[in-house]
Each structure stands twice: as C-alpha cells, then as structure tokens.
Image (cartoon, rainbow, N blue to C red):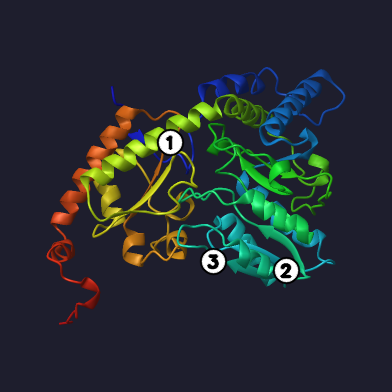
C-alpha cells in the first residue's frame, strides 16, 4: 500500500531511523546529565555516552575518536573549518581555494573571509560537475593555506575525486577541508586514505536527528589547529564551547553505526531504485537531460531537466510527492540553481530541473508511482507549451525572431 505524501527529497533531510530514536530516548529523561559535569554519576554517564558516539563516528570515517568535534550541524562545521583555519594560519598566508558548486555554507563563509582581506579562488567545474585537477594545481600559490572541496554535491550528487585532491594538498603543504555532509553514511569515507585534514558531517543527512553535526580535525601529520568561532567553557578541545547535546550525539553515533553495517547493501539497493526511476522517466518522455556525471554520483541522487516545462509548475503538479528544484537551502530564491548554471546548463533548462533524492525507506512501488506521475504531468504541461510544439515541428527556437507588441 502506498502512503502519501511520498518523500523523495532525502538530500534536504532524511527521516530518522526508528533504531536511532530508540537509542536516544533514555538520554532525555532518565540519563539527563551534562557531559561536562565531572564530579557525579549523572555527568559520568552522559560523558560515557558521548565517548561511545565519538567512537562510532570515528569508526565510520577511520579516524581517532579524539579528532571528532561536535557542532550543531554541517553549516556550523563548515564555518568553523574555514574561519578557524583562516584565522589560525593568517601568518602563513591568506589564500583559499574552493569550487563554484560548493554549498552556501562554504561559499558564504568564503565571501565573509574576502571582506576580512583574504583572497579566494573559485574554481569552475567541467560540464559533468567534476573539478579539473590541473586547474586546482595551477591555482595553488605560496600564500595558499586552505583548499575546500565538497565530497558529494547536494543538488547533482556528483562525487569529487577527493583522494586525488588530498594528495595534491599534501604535496603542497596545504590544509584540505571537505564538506562531506552528503557523502558520509552513503559512500565509504576514509579520512586517512583520502588525505582529508578537516571534514564536516551532519546527522540529519544520514537518518539521525537534526541540529547535531561534527567536524573532524586531524591531530597529526599534519596537526591542524583551528581558532574557535564560539568562545566559552573550552569544551571540545577548546574549538567549540557549549553544553553538549547528549541525546543528539547518541543518535548521531547510532546513525553512523547503522550506516557502517548496512552501507554496502543499501548503496546497491538505492542504485537499483535510481536506475529504475531514470529508465522509467526516459522511456516515457523525450527531451529529458541528466545533470551531473552519470556514474560518479551518490547512489540515491537523480537530477534531471525536463525541457519546455517550468520546474515550479512541475512541482505544483506533483503535490503528493516531496521533491525539490534546486537545493533546499536556497528555494526561497527564484534564481535558477547556481550549481546547474555552473555546469553550463542554460537558464531555461536549469529552471526545469527536478532533484530526486532516494533514501533508506523508499520502495520500488513508490518509484513506479513517481515515474507514472512525472510522465503524466510533463506531458500535460508540454501540451500547453507552444514552444514544445514548435520544437517538435523542427523549428530552431534559438534562431526565432520574437516580435514585441
């Protein structure tokens, strides 16, 4: 039995896994201690739970539990990483390299740093959304202190060649920061093998609670130092003060443990669901374009542009299905997605794109229903489009001279 509405927007957030909730519940009422209370049993119990979660997270990304700093989410982690590294290494240089398709948490932090006198290079991407490694190498100068490249894109699901970037950064003695909010828990991540020095994570993108995230900060080879952006009681190795969100942290740890055990199986299932969705849509419609590299992408991500259809009208026509056009954090703006524009997608096609985010709880039955509804709705909207009709008649729309009355 299908249950409505159908949720297919798993990049914006994920439903919490019931097993995560179960792990969290005792820490709201019975075990409510403050993990920084070192002189009684309530505090010790909370601290023990936090330590266990650090181990679960560290195990998933292959680091030392002491290298995990808890934050309120990936946005805060990205801010702490960029601003904290920039301040700490100011003596060494003032140049930062990032990519035009990064999440706003990185781009807006870079804009802030530019106002403070730092120089930022924004690398373009290729038509498939991938970073050009030769351009990256060429951009590094004596003054470069940080390279920030995301692991997997939140809109087009493209997975960047992180290990190669890590290697380049290492060779040049530059710190490498990676926003891995969309990657961790969905694809294998090994901060050692990938040469990542600082990495942002978020629980709610991997079936954990909202409002809790972490920043991995490398302790040796090289030891990375970060200036705090929140001052207070010196919690989290002095990098992030504030009373720890124990229930959230416990949930985050459990979510990582589940991903650790189930990722291989889950990835295979989500890839199968994604291909079923893609093939179904392409079989039913013409003039549909895939955005982003077809193979180097997250198992659950499908981003498609439907020519001659307005993305917003399409979403309105699919009210019983939760999807997004553009990314969830920027849907308040009417501009076409900056990520798609960066791939060279024209604004008409960028405006006609939908992001399908498949997740742990989606089924074959839901995919088949979504295929059927997308095909019906696009056909209905195209019937009302004179442009689609003209294109079908072979008229080259690029060369049409439109007259204004």
Taking the spot 56% from the left edge, 38% from the top edge, the residue there is: 187
285 sits to left or right of 140 = left
Q: Is residue 35 left or right of residue 151?
A: right
Whether residues under marks 3 and 2 lie with C-beta atoms below 8 angstroms apart, the answer is: no
Determine the residue positioned at 30% across, 28% down: 365
Q: Nearer the viewer, mark 1 or mark 2?
A: 1
- Please state the horizontal and vertical placement of residue 304, each as a whole percent of the image: 35, 51
Q: In this rendering, does residue 319 appear at all?
A: no
**Label 1 environment density (alpha carbons within 10 Å; few <14, some 14–19, many ≥20):** some
| Residue of label 1 | 271
Furthest toward the right, the residue is: 39
Check contact, mark 3 vs mark 1: CB within 8 A.
no
Looking at the image, is 80 positioned above or below residue 254?
below
Residue 12 x/y as whole percent: 47, 44
Q: Please say if 188 is above or below 138.
A: above
Q: Is residue 174 left or right of residue 399?
A: right
Crowd around label 2: few <14 · some 14–19 · many ≥20 (10 Å): many
Pick the front one: 248 or 103: 103
What whole-number distance in Å separates the C-alpha atoms at marks 3 and 1?
28 Å
Residue that mark 2 sits on: 95
10 Å neighbourhood of mark 3: few (<14), some, or many (≥20)?
some
* Residue located beneath label 3 in the image: 124
Image quadrant where one finds the N terminus: top left
Can you give x and y, in whole percent of width and height, for residue 133 in the image? 61, 61
Work out which quarter of the rendered image holds the C terminus and state it: bottom left
Q: Provide the secondary structure element on which disc 2 rests.
A: strand
């Amino acid at each position: 039995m299908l249950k409505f509405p159908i949720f297919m927007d798993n990049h914006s957030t994920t439903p919490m896994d019931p097993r995560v909730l179960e792990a969290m519940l005792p820490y709201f009422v019975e075990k409510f201690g403050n993990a920084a209370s070192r002189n009684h049993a309530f505090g010790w119990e909370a601290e023990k739970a936090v330590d266990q979660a650090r181990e679960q997270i560290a195990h998933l990304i292959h680091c030392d539990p002491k290298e995990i700093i808890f934050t309120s989410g990936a946005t805060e982690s990205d801010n702490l990483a960029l601003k904290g590294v920039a301040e700490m290494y100011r003596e060494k240089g003032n140049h930062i390299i990032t990519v035009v398709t990064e999440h706003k948490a990185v781009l807006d932090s870079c804009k802030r740093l530019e106002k403070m006198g730092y120089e930022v290079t924004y690398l373009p991407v290729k038509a498939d959304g991938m970073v050009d490694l030769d351009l990256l190498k060429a951009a590094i100068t004596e003054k470069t202190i940080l390279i920030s490249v995301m692991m997997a894109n939140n809109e087009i699901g493209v997975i960047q060649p992180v290990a190669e970037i890590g290697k380049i950064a290492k060779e040049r003695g530059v710190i490498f920061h990676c926003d891995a909010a969309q990657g961790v828990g969905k694809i294998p991540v090994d901060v050692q093998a990938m040469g990542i020095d600082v990495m942002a994570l978020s629980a709610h993108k991997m079936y954990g609670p909202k409002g809790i995230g972490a920043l991995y900060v490398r302790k040796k080879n090289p030891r990375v130092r970060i200036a705090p952006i929140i001052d207070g009681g010196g919690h989290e190795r002095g990098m992030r003060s504030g009373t720890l969100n124990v229930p959230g942290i416990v949930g985050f740890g459990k979510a990582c443990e589940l991903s650790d055990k189930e990722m291989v199986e889950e990835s295979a299932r989500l890839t199968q669901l994604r291909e079923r969705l893609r093939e179904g849509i392409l079989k039913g419609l013409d003039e549909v374009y895939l955005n982003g590299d077809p193979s180097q992408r997250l198992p659950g991500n499908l981003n498609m542009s439907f020519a001659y259809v307005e993305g917003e009208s399409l979403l309105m026509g699919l009210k019983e299905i939760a999807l997004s056009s553009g990314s969830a954090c920027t849907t308040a703006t009417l501009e076409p997605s900056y990520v798609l524009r960066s791939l060279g997608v024209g604004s008409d096609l960028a405006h006609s794109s939908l992001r399908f985010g498949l997740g742990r709880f989606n089924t074959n039955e839901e995919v088949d229903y979504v295929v059927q509804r997308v095909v019906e709705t696009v056909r209905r909207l195209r019937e009302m489009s004179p442009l689609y009709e003209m294109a079908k008649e072979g008229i080259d729309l690029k060369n049409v001279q439109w007259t204004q009355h």
